[in-house]
Image: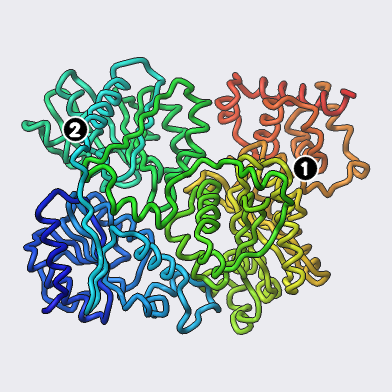
Amino acid sequence: MNLPKQLSYWFEQRRSKLCHRQLLVIAGQEKWTRNAAVTLLYDNNIQSTLWVGDTDTETEYENITVKDYRSKLGHEYEWLVLNCFSGFRANAAMALSGTVRAHGLMIILCPELSEWPYYADPEQNNRISYGNQQPHLQSFFIQHLISCFRENSDVAILSADKFSGEVAFVDDNLETNHYYEQDTAVKSICKVAEGHTNRPLILTADRGRGKSSALGIAAAKLMQTSDKTLYLTAPQIHCVEQVFVHNKRMLTNALITKNGVEYQASSLTFKPLDVLLADESLPDLLLVDEASAIPVHTLNKLVKKFPRVVFSSTVHGYEGSGRGFEMRFIKQLSQLKPNFKRFNMLQPIRWYKHDTLERFWFNTFFQEVQTDIENIESINQQIECRHVSKAQLLHDKELLADLFRLLINAHYQTSQDDLQRFLDAPEIEFFILTRGIALLGVAQIVKEGGDCFRELANTIADCSKRVKGHLVAQNITSSYNTPPFLLAEQWRISRIAIDPEQQSKGFGKQLIQYVEQQAKQQHIKFLTTSFGCNTDIIKFWYNSEFTLAKLSAKPEVSSGEHSAICIKPLTREAVKTSDTIHEAFYQEFLYQIDKKFQFMSEGLLIQILVFEQTGNLDVFENIQPLEQFAIGKRAYFTCKRLLKEYLIINPGCFSKLESPEQTLLVAALLQNLSDQKICTKFNLSGKKQIEQALKTSFRKILFDA
């Protein structure tokens, strides 16, 4: 196969001197690009290759689909070939780039660059909601990706008749000790096991820094020097493969078991999270790998239970989880264990410092978190809200970068796939709030419902069918059997983010008011939103005149919070539908307080009751039994139902009590916990002490001015 001479010279240069990992884009007809890649693999005698996507050639390369990319994380290859004719996934591209070892190549096969934005990507339908599939849909994301190729001289581009690209040589002056930070990490891990208790270690790093291997090496050192029982946990056992590889490498005479390693009188054992939390034994050290993929509430339980624990986390999580770990867990850990330690590994081990492949993908997906600096020119400018189109974002990369970084910082699940979805899904739109050229806030809306459901509304309402997307529209319709809600055009505010320095100034509410104004102009019937429910967030949506319409039966795995849906009707007809939905929700909520919501945060439960208050104390005719109970005349079991009804009708009464008194009332009367659970939770001795505490609280409620 004849390839441009410049390409041969490029490879000669790469063989002549130490080089960084690089990206090579091969663009053209699919069969030609495949043949070109195979020719290069053969000519360069590449022994270790991962081919992702379709291949019509008989090769001995490892081959997976783009959907299976997670199965290869932690593996290493000389070259990686990503066949984009089989579909492009942003998460997969960034994650798989981490499997390319030092001096290696990542190769992308794609159509001619001028044609690629119009190519019918097989993965496209997975990013677009029902009713929005359009043939020959132009990909703004692919245009963005191509511009990143062309703007970066370290990216080599090969077509049938042309080659361009420079060799990225490794600087001779780079430090040669790749293992200094890993050695420091190993010492820090060992110190957790041998030093003071209740000083957890947070170990963070990007891919390729030797984070997991540091866990394995540290465990081996501890096992060699003294008798230690070590536990290892992660979302799945395959996540810790590298930990065990390096642990076994250092313990040559160790006994390998099904879920661990035994060495003399020491052991390293993998324990699934549920087993770990149920197990009453305490190890000498607990190692938690891929901590950013574990729910925050589970991490908190581990912190409270284990006095010696190391949490290892990837900074730039490929599923968008890394930022959630930083934003949610670290903040809570500083309150639970203020003496915790942190160590961030910056020095790559699997490749060289200033690696060009890693830098390309970080820049393409705006992963570098920048410190926001107040723009002097914008300070005295007027605040403005406006709609911004995909085309405008594509041509204003600085605004696109600011917008995406703002969403990453505000929403823990924002991933690289989301950038692709933001730019390509026709149902997604953005409204921004600016002061001059400074971006202060962004609201992302997703169009849902409408006439596209004319034939399906009844089958979705009766729970016999579900289509892609339309999260709130379908959820509410099937929950309350309301086809009119699904047929109403609605905008779901799927994300809203305000710059951290500009929060608590009313900008969020101002942006929502602007979105509402624009929605009304376009005859949208409802605004909706879905979020992880806590007291601060639900208060924000209540203050913007949204009403609660649904609470998930179980907390979300990713956040540990119940998922909430709120809606706001924008027309008279929509108000009637909204009232029907809201009444059904509130009755279900009251019914489920002591069932599905038995372990909900007491503060959140009280707040919902306060906002939803519909009763009238003037018609509460059975106040005397409550007063009799409060002064000790009436037995608790004879008036428990009345006490509960009083709290539901008059949730404002909680404000007369201290927080521990409030939570006890909720647990005993609303959530109906058993006496044993109440005693354990509130450190009470028995039934008499529970009833006495309840009497004291009701005396304050009924008799204190």
Crowding near pointer 1: few (<14 within 10 Å), some, many (20+)?
some
Residue 176 x, y percent position in the rendering: 17, 35
The residue at which mark 1 appears reads as 610
Residue 481 x, y percent position in the rendering: 66, 70
Residue closest to the far right:
618
Q: Is residue 115 shown above or below 580?
A: below
Q: Nearer the viewer, residue 475 or 521?
A: 521
Residue 321 x, y percent position in the rendering: 43, 47
Name the residue type under label 1: Val
The residue at which mark 2 appears reads as 177
Q: Nearer the viewer, residue 445 or 257?
A: 445
Where residue 184 sits, quadrant-wise, is: top left
Where residue 118 sits, quadrant-wise, is: bottom left
Residue depicted at 64% across the width and 57% down the height = 432
Q: Nearer the viewer, residue 461 or 491?
A: 491
| Residue 133 in sight in this render | yes
All told, the count of numbered labels is: 2
Q: Quarter of the image for the N terminus: give it.
A: bottom left
Q: Secondary structure at mark 1?
A: helix
Q: Is residue 13 shown above or below 599?
A: below
Which of the two labelled residues, at mark 1 and mark 2, occupies the earlier sequence position? 2
Residue depicted at 55% across the width and 47% down the height = 410
